[in-house]
């Protein structure tokens, strides 16, 4: 209770600080305008009265002394966003301190509500308006960390095994939703139900931005549910790739709307289709190139380990910006940059650099997600809206209906080619988990009201759709998942036995596919692995002898787990050992323990024999094994001092330690045999 009171005081202090800062900025702006107006009036009076009035004004002029304190909020108002992040983090702490709320509501709901409350407070206090969430801020600063964090720690094998299904839902499914929603809403508008005359291209522009499944909202909800990996990768992969499709469709219909329906020709449609392919494939190619460049650069950082995380973050972000320069898909670029570089980078960087990258990436993604949902709530209050009841209701209705129909149709098509079929429960979760979020909101605020006067109505309908999916579907999906018995993900790592059998089965099935003449996923993976080991790995990885890094990583993790388990068992065993006084008391009847004439005990320690127990022998054995297995790899120490040098232990990669430990383990067993 005490912690909650302190937290509420901190939140109140932050809110009052924001309001006071905005009020000060407003007063400063008003004072500046007043001063400017007074100066203009003075100049005008000087021109009228002539030199005599000018001399009088100079006589009345007073010199200002050096101020002790100066209030200049305008200088720091941009970096003052740190207070917003601090307030949002306090809200997240308080949210997780109340289990009754956190078990029912997703975290994204709390952040949106907090943003709405802050927006209402700023309006009530008549403070300066907060800048809303603009499209440039969202796409250039907030979205890239979230996408990079998701793809860098995403299992590549699971993604590529389901790539066909993901592409069907991401590309064909998004086009299906955009066309069906646009045609249906335009047909209803012709009946006059909306009371407005909405052009067909404007309706297609709205349907293209409202049809996309948002990765930010999906990650915020599905990570809390912890559904199984295949179901998660299908929904998340769709939301990841369909953003590129949505942005292309949006710009396509935006360009057509500016041209006008009467001016569109067949060559414009052909150019739109070609642009669709170029944007998607071009963004993917740029991401792959930057991924290889990142891997090559980290190959050369053995002497400056401290800057290894910088290359991972900066070069991935440059891949995103490079694609945006040419109006290609930056989302696809940073996606495939992360997928390409992570396997090579993890073999080049040190273990501590890996830890730094992991937690820094998680921190940036969480902060960006927090700011997005919080500013979404603030923008809801401070944006211009045009409410149309039937338009909002039918938008939510048809988005839900066509989402369900699309999942049923395309999952039936994909099941013809899948070994593991998409079941009914999975279809329901995929249909119900099609959440909309900040991507749709960021696109709708970029619409130019001059060319499309109905932009305020589209904005209101988009916010209503986002609120419906985040609040209604986001709150109810967790109980429905529990009610339907959806499989949860297993939080465990593969054993060495599972890894070995997985590799063996891959090679066996690849050979079977080659014998029967079938070019399946395993055959393609086997060919790429041979090409990778022969050409790419020697060029991009420092240790050229690493053939199966996953096996080495698994072995290293197993040995660490065994060491920790042995230490835990040894500690538990040591707590049960009797004290030395009890041992003496229990051994008082020993023949070598005699009593002298004065009635005092005489303990002849030299005559006592040491009889080690089985536990003592096991402890000694494991001590020698662990000391041999975990002996660090010796490296030559640098002869000169370097400002950015690190310890020799920190310069070891996982492959270095794994190779050394595996060699010692194999050598020990060979000697025993």
Image: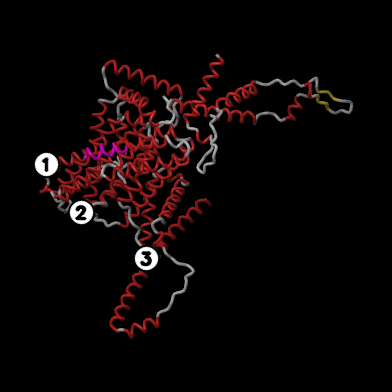
For label 2, the residue is 454
Q: Quadrant of residue 226?
A: top left
Q: Relative to 376, does residue 583 appear above or below in the rendering?
A: above
Q: Are marks 2 and 3 in contact (CB under 8 Å)?
A: no
Callout 1 crowding tier (Cα within 10 Å): few <14, some 14–19, many ≥20: few
For label 3, the residue is 26
**Image position, residue 342 (x, y; %):** 39, 34
Callout 3 crowding tier (Cα within 10 Å): few <14, some 14–19, many ≥20: some
Of mark 3 and mark 1, the one earlier in the sequence is: 3
Magenta run includes residue 459: no
Q: Residue furthest right?
A: 597
- Identity of the residue drawn at 26% across and 41% down: 400
- Identity of the residue drawn at 30% across and 26% down: 421
Residue mark closest to the camera, 3 vs 1: 1
Q: Secondary structure at mark 1?
A: helix
Examine the residues drawn in magenta and state their main secondary structure. Answer: helix
Q: Secondary structure at mark 2?
A: loop
For label 1, the residue is 266
Of mark 1 and mark 2, the one earlier in the sequence is: 1
Q: Are marks 1 and 2 in contact (CB under 8 Å)?
A: no
Q: Relative to 64, does residue 663 appear above or below in the rendering?
A: above
């Amino acid at each position: 209770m005490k912690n909650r009171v302190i937290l509420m005081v901190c939140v109140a202090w932050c809110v009052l600080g924001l309001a006071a800062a905005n009020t000060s900025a407003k007063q400063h702006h008003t004072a500046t305008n007043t001063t400017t107006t007074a100066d203009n009036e003075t100049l005008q009076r000087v021109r009228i009265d002539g030199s005599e009035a000018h001399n009088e004004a100079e006589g009345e002029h007073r010199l200002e002394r050096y101020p002790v304190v100066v209030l200049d909020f305008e200088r720091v108002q941009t970096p003052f966003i740190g207070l917003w992040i601090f307030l949002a983090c306090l809200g997240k702490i308080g949210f997780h301190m109340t289990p009754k709320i956190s078990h029912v509501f997703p975290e994204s709901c709390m952040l949106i509500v907090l943003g709405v409350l802050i927006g209402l407070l700023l309006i009530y206090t008549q403070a300066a308006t907060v800048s809303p969430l603009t499209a440039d801020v969202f796409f250039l600063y907030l979205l890239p960390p979230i996408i990079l964090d998701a793809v860098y720690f995403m299992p590549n094998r699971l993604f590529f095994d389901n790539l066909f299904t993901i592409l069907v839902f991401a590309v064909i499914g998004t086009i299906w939703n955009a066309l069906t929603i646009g045609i249906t809403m335009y047909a209803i508008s012709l009946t006059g139900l909306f009371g407005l005359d909405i052009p067909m291209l404007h309706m297609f522009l709205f349907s293209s931005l409202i049809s996309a499944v948002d990765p930010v909202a999906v990650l915020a909800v599905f990570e809390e549910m912890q559904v199984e990996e295949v179901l998660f990768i299908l929904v998340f992969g769709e939301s990841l790739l369909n953003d590129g499709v949505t942005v292309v469709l949006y710009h396509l219909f935006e360009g057509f709307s500016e041209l006008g329906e009467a001016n569109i020709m067949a060559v414009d449609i052909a150019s739109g289709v070609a642009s669709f392919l170029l944007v998607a494939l071009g963004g993917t190619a740029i991401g792959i190139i930057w991924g290889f460049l990142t891997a090559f650069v980290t190959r050369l950082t053995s002497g400056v380990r401290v800057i290894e995380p910088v290359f991972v973050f900066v070069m991935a972000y440059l891949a995103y910006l490079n694609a945006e320069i040419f109006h290609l898909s930056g989302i696809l670029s940073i996606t495939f940059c992360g997928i390409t570089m992570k396997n090579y980078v993890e073999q080049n960087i040190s273990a501590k650099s890996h830890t730094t990258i992991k937690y820094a990436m998680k921190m940036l993604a969480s902060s960006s997600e927090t700011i997005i949902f919080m500013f979404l709530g603030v923008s809801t209050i401070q944006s211009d809206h045009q409410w149309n009841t039937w338009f909002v209701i039918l938008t939510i209705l048809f988005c839900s209906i066509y989402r369900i129909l699309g999942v049923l149709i395309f999952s039936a098509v994909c099941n013809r080619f899948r070994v593991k079929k998409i079941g009914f429960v999975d279809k329901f979760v995929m249909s119900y988990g099609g959440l909309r979020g900040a991507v749709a909101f960021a696109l709708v605020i970029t619409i130019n009201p001059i060319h499309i006067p109905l932009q305020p109505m589209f904005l209101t309908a988009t916010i209503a759709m986002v609120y419906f999916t985040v609040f209604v579907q986001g709150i109810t999906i967790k109980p429905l998942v529990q009610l339907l018995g959806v499989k949860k993900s297993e939080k465990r790592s593969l054993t060495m036995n599972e890894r070995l059998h997985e590799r063996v089965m891959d090679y066996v099935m690849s050979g079977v596919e080659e014998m029967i003449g079938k070019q399946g996923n395993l055959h393609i993976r086997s060919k790429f692995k041979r090409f990778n080991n022969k050409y790419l790995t020697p060029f991009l990885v420092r240790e050229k002898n690493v053939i199966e890094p996953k096996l080495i990583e698994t072995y290293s993790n197993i040995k660490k787990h065994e060491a920790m388990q042995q230490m835990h068992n040894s500690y538990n065993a040591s707590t049960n050992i009797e004290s030395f006084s009890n041992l003496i008391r229990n051994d008082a009847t020993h023949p070598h323990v005699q009593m002298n004439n004065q009635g005092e005990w005489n303990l002849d320690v030299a005559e006592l024999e040491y009889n080690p127990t089985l536990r003592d022998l096991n402890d000694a054995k494991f001590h020698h094994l662990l000391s041999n297995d975990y002996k660090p790899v010796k490296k030559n120490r640098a002869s000169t001092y370097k400002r950015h040098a690190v310890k020799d232990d920190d310069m070891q990669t996982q492959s270095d330690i794994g190779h050394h430990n595996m060699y010692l383990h194999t050598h020990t067993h060979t000697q025993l045999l």
